Image (cartoon, grey):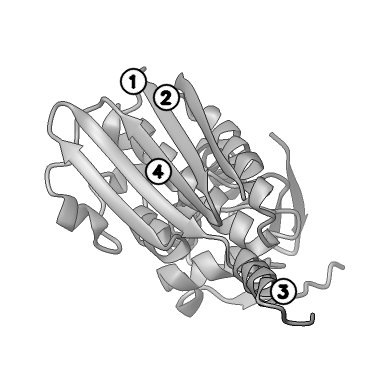
């Protein structure tokens, strides 16, 4: 079984959004996810990284850190900034809520993360930064695990 | 970044050829608004046939252009939307106000 980890650090430039999601997706692809699962991961990462750039650093230069882990059939992703922090996390999670409507932000970022990943946790301290933790189980793997288990208890496949 | 335009009978077809994230959406927004202001179409059609990725920045970008078209008395439509992009558009509810066709006849 896989157990793996990677860390990524980059400047909060919007041109790095594609770099970040593609890199995390490449790492997660070790779990052999479906195209749809991979698209979900890419989208969630893109949302979290965009939040760091627009909200955390308010488009000024800062460092964004990503830590990704593979534990059995689950991928865990931690995306953090040391920017301004979120005043009201509960409100920020609400669909269509945005503090940047003037930038044509839809307020769907956290909603998308929540619906595309199995688990989303937000840790934020005003003035210190925000850390988003997300987890997704790669379902395709469950079938394989079940098959392996079935074989190990003497089943015929 | 490359955007293809087809203009015919006061109809503006905008073909996006890249993944739509916050970085790209800002560029699309500037370029397309410029094109709309100059051509003043009755209808703007976004062709998403070559878009393989879109996040919530796309939602904001589409709503912004929808508002702009309304302002000049026109309409907005989206064609050739992929399954993953559709998922995001449906989540935002904009599929209820903006028509989405699967196939587009060019001609």
Comparing A128 with A151, the one in front is: A151
Comparing A3 with A153, the one in front is: A153
Is residue A111 left or right of A46 when viewed as pictured? left
Task: Please say if the residues under marks 1 and 3 sit with CB atoms less than 8 Å apart.
Answer: no
The residue carrying mark 2 is A12
The residue carrying mark 4 is A48
Q: Nearer the viewer, mark 1 or mark 4?
A: 4
Q: CA distance from mark 1 to mark 4?
A: 16 Å
The spot of residue A23 in percent (x, y) is 61, 35
Task: Please say if the residues under marks 1 and 2 sit with CB atoms less than 8 Å apart.
Answer: yes
- The lab-note entry on whether marks 3 and 2 share a chain reads yes
- The lab-note entry on whether marks 3 and 4 share a chain reads yes
Task: Please say if the residues under marks 1 and 4 sit with CB atoms less than 8 Å apart.
Answer: no
Tell me which label, 3 or 2, sits earlier in the chain.
2
The spot of residue A42 in percent (x, y) is 56, 49
- The lab-note entry on whether marks 4 and 2 share a chain reads yes
Q: Give SS at disc 1.
A: loop
The residue carrying mark 3 is A151
Q: Is residue B37 above or below residue A117?
A: above
The residue carrying mark 1 is A60
Q: CA distance from mark 1 to mark 2?
A: 7 Å
Tell me which label, 1 or 2, sits earlier in the chain.
2
Tell me which label, 3 or 4, sits earlier in the chain.
4
Q: Nearer the viewer, mark 1 or mark 2?
A: 2
Q: CA distance from mark 4 to mark 2?
A: 12 Å
Circle 4 marks a residue in which chain?
Answer: A
Circle 1 marks a residue in which chain?
Answer: A
């Amino acid at each position: 079984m896989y157990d793996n980890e990677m860390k990524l650090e980059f400047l909060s430039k919007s041109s790095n959004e594609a770099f970040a999601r593609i890199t995390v997706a490449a790492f997660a692809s070790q779990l052999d996810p479906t195209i749809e699962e991979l698209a979900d991961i890419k989208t969630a990462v893109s949302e979290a990284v965009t939040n760091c750039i627009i909200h955390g650093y308010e488009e000024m230069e800062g460092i964004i850190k990503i830590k990704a882990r593979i534990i059995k059939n689950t991928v865990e992703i931690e995306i953090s900034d040391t920017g301004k922090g979120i005043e009201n996390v509960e409100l920020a999670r609400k669909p269509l809520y945005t503090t940047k409507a003037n930038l044509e932000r839809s307020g769907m970022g956290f909603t998308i993360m929540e619906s595309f990943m199995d688990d989303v946790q937000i840790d934020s301290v005003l003035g210190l930064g925000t850390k988003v933790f997300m987890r997704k189980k790669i379902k395709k793997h469950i079938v394989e695990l079940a098959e392996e288990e079935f074989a190990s208890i003497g089943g015929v496949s | 970044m490359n955007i293809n335009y087809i203009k015919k009978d006061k109809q503006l077809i905008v073909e996006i050829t890249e993944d739509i994230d916050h970085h790209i959406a800002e560029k699309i927004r500037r370029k397309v608004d410029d094109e709309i202001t100059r051509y003043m179409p009755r209808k703007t059609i976004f062709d998403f046939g070559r878009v393989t990725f879109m996040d919530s920045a796309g939602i904001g970008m589409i709503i912004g252009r929808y508002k702009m078209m309304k302002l000049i008395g026109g309409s907005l439509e989206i064609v050739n939307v992929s399954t993953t992009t559709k998922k995001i558009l449906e989540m935002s509810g904009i599929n209820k106000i903006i028509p989405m066709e699967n196939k587009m006849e060019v001609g």
